[in-house]
Image: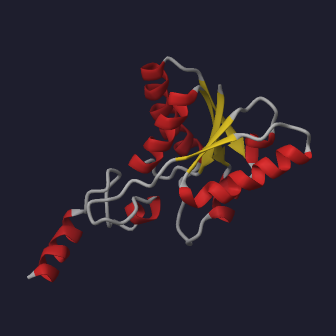
């Protein structure tokens, strides 16, 4: 099975790793990594995003480990538009998060209009941080949590003060 997934992945965190793992469980993987231009357009909040090359390096490291574990092939391609590579014929499945599932539905509409079979959409649930909120790159960049969802030492101190 040929599996696609896409994103900005800045920084990579356990929520992204859950997406990668599900993709590699299903088959060979093509990761669409947003171009620098698209990364800025798709951000829901205004924040710095590292360069494509820096993000590509990190995604490559993550995918390499999963590819070895699952004995799969992978490639990383640049996304220049939000519907990305998944509208191309060779894919069978698309791995998404709950908030990107509507994009998967849109991709299937495009595929069907182009005479292609729809993709199997695999929704991977969010991974929660220790505070019960979703692990997100923005929360990591803001210093609230680390890539594994642990509260940063500064935030742990604030949480314990509130509880007293």
Q: Is residue 23 left or right of residue 84?
A: left
Percent position (x, y) of residue 38?
Answer: 70, 57
For the point 50% across and 36% down, the residue is 22
Q: Eyeballing the image, is 39 above or below 112? A: below
Left or right relative to 55: residue 102: right
Name the residue nearer the viewer: 19 or 60. 19
Q: Quadrant of the C terminus?
A: bottom left
The one of 87 and 148 positioned closer to us in this rendering: 87
* The residue positioned farthest toward the top in the image shown: 71
Q: Is residue 41 left or right of residue 140?
A: right
Res 151 seen here: yes
Q: Residue furthest right?
A: 114
Q: Residue furthest left?
A: 164
Q: Look at 50% across and 31% down and name the residue there.
A: 63
Residue 76 position in % (x across, y down): 63, 34
Q: Quick check: 130 above or below 46? A: above
In the rendering, at what x and y percent does residue 91 appear?
73, 32
> Does any portion of residue 81 appear in the rendered image?
no
Question: In front: 144, or 124?
Answer: 124
Q: Total number of numbered labels?
A: 0
Q: Is residue 95 above or below residue 70?
A: below
Q: Residue at x 49, y 24 (%)?
A: 67
Give residue 153's position: percent from left, percent from top: 19, 64
* Colouring used for the render: secondary structure
Query: Could you tell me which quadrant the N terminus lies in?
Result: top right
Quarter holding residue 94:
top right
At x 53% / y 68%, what residue is drawn?
A: 47
Q: Is residue 116 above or below residue 42?
A: above
């Amino acid at each position: 099975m040929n599996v696609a997934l896409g994103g900005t992945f800045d920084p990579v965190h356990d929520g992204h790793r859950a997406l990668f793992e599900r993709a590699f469980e299903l088959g060979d993987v093509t990761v669409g990594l947003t171009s620098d231009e698209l990364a800025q357009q798709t951000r829901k909040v205004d924040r710095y995003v590292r360069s494509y090359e820096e993000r590509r390096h990190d995604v490559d490291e993550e995918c390499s480990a999963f590819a070895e574990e699952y004995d799969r092939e992978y490639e990383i391609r640049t996304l220049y538009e939000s519907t990305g590579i998944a509208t191309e014929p060779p894919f069978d499945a698309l791995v998404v998060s709950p908030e990107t599932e509507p994009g998967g539905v849109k991709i299937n509409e495009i595929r069907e209009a182009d005479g292609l079979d729809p993709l199997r959409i695999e929704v991977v649930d969010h991974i929660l941080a220790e505070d019960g909120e979703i692990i997100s790159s923005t929360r990591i960049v803001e210093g609230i949590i680390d890539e594994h969802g642990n509260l940063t030492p500064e935030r742990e101190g604030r949480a314990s003060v509130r509880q007293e």
